[in-house]
Amino acid sequence: MKTYCVVVIGHVDHGKTSLVRALTGTDTDRLPEEKARGLSITPGFAHCTYPGGVVDLVDAPGHADFIQAMISGASGAQAALVVISMADGVCAQTLEHLRIAGLLGIAQAVIAVTKSDTVPRAEHSKRLSEITQALSQTPYANAPKVVCSALSGQGIEALHNALEKLLAYEIQNTHSPYSFLPIDRTFTLEGQGTVVTGTLLGQDLNLEDKLHLQPAGSEISIRSLQSRGVTRDRIKVGERMAANLRGINAREIARGSVLCTQGVGTPSNCIDVHLKLLSAPAKPLKHMQELRVLFGASSAVAQVRLFKGYDQEFAQLRFRKPVVGFEGQVAILRCLSPSETLGNAQFLDPEAKPTKTGDVERLGVLVAAQKRDPRAIAHALIKQGKGLAKQTDIARLARVRTDILADVLGEKFVNVNSVRITSEKQIEVAKLAIVNALTQYHLAHPLRSSAPRSVIENRSFAALFVQYVEDKLVAKGALLKAANMLSLADHDPMAKLSNAQHQSMRKIEDAYRLAGLEEPSGETLPQTDETTELKQLLLEQKRLISLHNVALKRTLVFHTETLDWAANALGFAFAKQQPFTTSQARTALGTSRRVIVPLLEHFDTIGVTIRDSDTRQIASAKAVPQSTGA
């Protein structure tokens, strides 16, 4: 059966509650104080059943002091029943309620011109004309009008007909793909426990659904669901409902709490929004102004920070305490003093992080989110995230479920891991940046075989993203990687050597060959930048070997032939697996402790020697293989 939620609004004492009673037989004023004062303080609830479905009526308070309760009752409504006394006409609070209803996105309305029995019939036409004129500048200028009286019953049947026609309209649901119930009432029933009520938003709710109570973060189990006094296994979005909760006391449920699907509705102090301001407020909205923000059943104070670049369209609301909202939810903005409605704020990211108002990339995200373009949102978040975006962030801002995000985005987006996503376009941009960085390094240092990885680090890209693209280039064969060094696959420093550099390289090699277990002196091998780079080439080609003396924090360099000679000399001196000490090895090779310690450690590593506590032995009696530096 189709349902439609209608909020009943209007000026105080125009007869809203009496009219709802005449339509439904239900007295929505349930509190003793309401009955004693003769005015509604909190929203009341009733319904009308028609052949085409059910219309839920939310009787909102009309007094100016209870705007918060009116907004709470109107949140989730699809249409408004605007009650205007024929005797009093359109009053200040009537216009305020109409402004708020329009800002909440309530598109349909029925105008009930009540108390017609208190005005002579001859004046009806004039009064209706005055009401029509007063409504001409409101969102509901063309709404149907029904003259009626709750006391005499005049026009009640016609009003039923007008309400039933609302069922022909489709429910406009631009909200979350998850279930959200802003709790507008909490109470305890004897023998049943805690009950919460509200208008269901987002998606349908099933009895077996797993829910969280936010902002408390408590897991909630539902004992039963009800709508209009009937126990149900499923509540449809837009319906008034009650949920009987297990394991929680009514006193534990704070004002502004929300019952929602587990995993969503994370409380936040920051909400990024799109603003829609009224054309002529008494005072214009200012950057860093504190406002009253009313949404769902919540009322909170926030500081508004306007993003630069758009004319008061996008802002970040910073709350004093964490609040819970969802993407697409609409809040009403009011001045703290005097209490005046400024406009509305549509939540774009209710889990935002504090940011600077001049953050151009964040503004790009909000523009895409406001347009509800999933691919544009993904691109904007990837740009903001320096190449990466969380899948959950994209899904949240696009208002789609994470499990269908890949289908929504298409093939041009790639999962970097189970959490983050990037785009093929961004990958190509990063590939080009990495290749260009290495190309420039190779041009500047043609004699160096590879570049330190820091060369490709880029402040424009996240480190994880650079690593991902780097791995793809290495897998493709475009890059060569060794330890923490990188080079383009087609870079060959040997091919770039001049004849003079080839000769210098041979001189360097000869100098180390002749030096044996010593190092060439500065006179034999002057230290220049070119000498250093040619020496590095010899090391990379394994014609020279570097050993590190940890104790002295010094690196020693020897020719490969020298190490082959040392290995064979030790094999000859300590044949047949004869154990020897470091001191004995030093004597056998005629060298110093500075050299023998790193030399033996190197031989241990490559398997020439086997260490046993303070002694070693040659790995086999067979002559040690050549090129022990390999």
Image (spheres, rainbow, N blue to C red):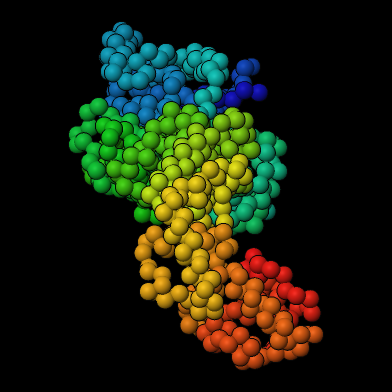
- Observer-nearest of 333 and 339: 333
Residue 153 left/right relative to 305:
right
| Residue 74 makes an appearance in the image | no
Q: Quadrant of the N terminus?
A: top right
Residue in the image at 66% along x and 51% along y:
221
Coordinates of residue 415 in the picture (x, y in percent):
59, 41
Q: Give the vertical position of 214 relative to 53 (above or below).
A: below
- Observer-nearest of 262 and 164: 262
- Observer-nearest of 480 and 243: 480
Residue 472 left/right relative to 567:
left
Coordinates of residue 450 in the picture (x, y in percent):
49, 53
Q: Quadrant of the C terminus?
A: bottom right
Residue 226 left/right relative to 385:
right
- Observer-nearest of 459 and 136: 459
Please, which residue is most extreme toward the left here?
A: 283
Residue 124, picture quadrant:
top left
Residue in the image at 54% along x and 77% along y:
516
Residue in the image at 64% along x and 17% along y:
51
Residue 359, picture quadrant:
top left
Coordinates of residue 427 in the picture (x, y in percent):
51, 38
| Residue 554 makes an appearance in the image | yes
Coordinates of residue 453 in the picture (x, y in percent):
48, 55
Counting every numbered tag in the picture gives 0
Residue in the image at 30% along x and 44% along y:
357
